[in-house]
Amino acid sequence: MSQQKKSRKKLWIGLGAGLTVLVIAAVFAVKSVSGSTKIDPTQLAHAEMADVARSVVATGKVQAITQVEVKSKASGIVTKLFTDINQPVHTGQVLAQLDQQEILDQVAAQQAQLASAQSNAKSAAAAVEYDKVAAEAPDLPNLEHGYKRQLAMQKEGVVSQQSLDDAQQKYLAAVNVRDKGVAQVLVDQGKYKQAVAQVQQAEASLKQLEEQLSYTTVRSPMDGVVLSRDVQVGDAVSSILVLGSTATLVMTLGDTHQVYVKGKVDESDIGKVYMNQGARIKVQSFPGKTFEGHVTKIAPLGVEKDNVTTFEVWISIDNPGGELKSNMTANAEIVMEEHKHVLTIPEQAVIYDKDRNASVWIPDPKEKEGHRAVPIKIGLSNGSKVEVISGLKAGDTIVLQQTS
């Protein structure tokens, strides 16, 4: 009995040892087949066709190319407002009305003064015409002829001295009337000129008051849209003619069909930026939309701040739909070079040797490390994607290099 137990015990020990050997062999087999070739899927990418562009990004605010601050030439209280923000306006359109009562009273008084001056001028003109008749002395030639005839006849003894004296007196009286008339005409003409000058002065004063009256009506100086309305009915408005740039801002208008972004470009990149260069503009409000623009101004003078020199660049943008609003933050990508529909891979996959020759890893289970290096020729890069000229084809799987 004891001998049988010992035999069974030896059998079980042998079976256990054999099973252990099989398990160990299996583990080694699995490791040899798959352990060294497994690559994290997150480290894999594919070569694909895409557009690649090298560009400079300038960040700034959207502004209307044509933008004006509307201020009143008159001082007063706002009585009416005829438009509001984001509403279109046209040149000459009434935007706001100030209180007119005081200036209307002044206009009425000046109109009355003008009427009085015109009446005086008419009276002076009539006096000139009246005295001209006396100055012309129509009876004087006859009286002179009669006097001379009486004088001749008196020498002949035909008429008496009294008759001669009467004729002489009438003649001299007529001469005196004529001379007085001529003098009075000169006086009347002077009065008439003075009256005319008073009329002209009254007309000028009335014109000035009417112009001041027009100042109480604030009109649009341009076609555009109301960007801001800075007063309410009842607000006091100061005159720009009195206070200049510190006068009350009534409204801000702009033509939003044409806008621009004024951004800053580093001095290392400004040499690559030129006039009419294309640009792509993006704003946070429209994350999926790109607006097209072009460079219209490049500042000739750089600005240094914190040991960094930048240059201001203006990028004009067509905005017919008015989606872009003033003061939106925009990123303007100024395209320096672009290759469309070319084979690309992530920049992270490219390996450079000491001679700047490029290569990539592609998965290969036959290799000890699970991948092998493939030399490639690269082209344009934007920092995240790089163009592959040769060495790969679309759809090839590549290994991304781990970043520390």
Image (cartoon, helix red, strand yellow):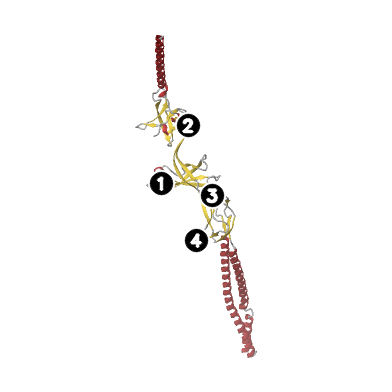
Residue 310 disc label: 1
Q: Earlier in the sequence, mark 3 or mark 4?
A: 4
Give 133 or 211, whichever is nearer the viewer.
211
| Residue 157 seen in render | no
Give 350 or 14, whichever is nearer the viewer.
14
Residue 255 disc label: 3
Rendered residue at 57%/50% (across/down) = 88
Looking at numbered disc 4 in the image, what kind of residue is underneath it?
Leu
| Residue 391 drawn at (x, y percent) | 42, 28
Residue position for label 4: 243
Badge 4 vs badge 1, beta-carbon distance below 8 Å:
no
Q: Residues within 10 Å of mark 1 (few under 14, many from 20)?
A: many
| Residue 248 drawn at (x, y percent) | 52, 58
Looking at numbered disc 3 in the image, what kind of residue is underneath it?
Asp
Q: Residues within 10 Å of mark 3 (few under 14, many from 20)?
A: many
Q: Residue furthest left?
A: 354
Q: Earlier in the sequence, mark 3 or mark 2?
A: 2
| Residue 301 drawn at (x, y percent) | 40, 49
Badge 2 vs badge 1, beta-carbon distance below 8 Å:
no
Q: Earlier in the sequence, mark 4 or mark 1?
A: 4
* Image quadrant where one finds the N terminus: top left
Alpha carbon distance from label 4 to label 2: 63 Å
Alpha carbon distance from label 3 to label 4: 27 Å
Looking at numbered disc 2 in the image, what kind of residue is underneath it?
Met
- In the visual, does 137 lie left or right of 250? right
| Residue 221 drawn at (x, y percent) | 55, 54
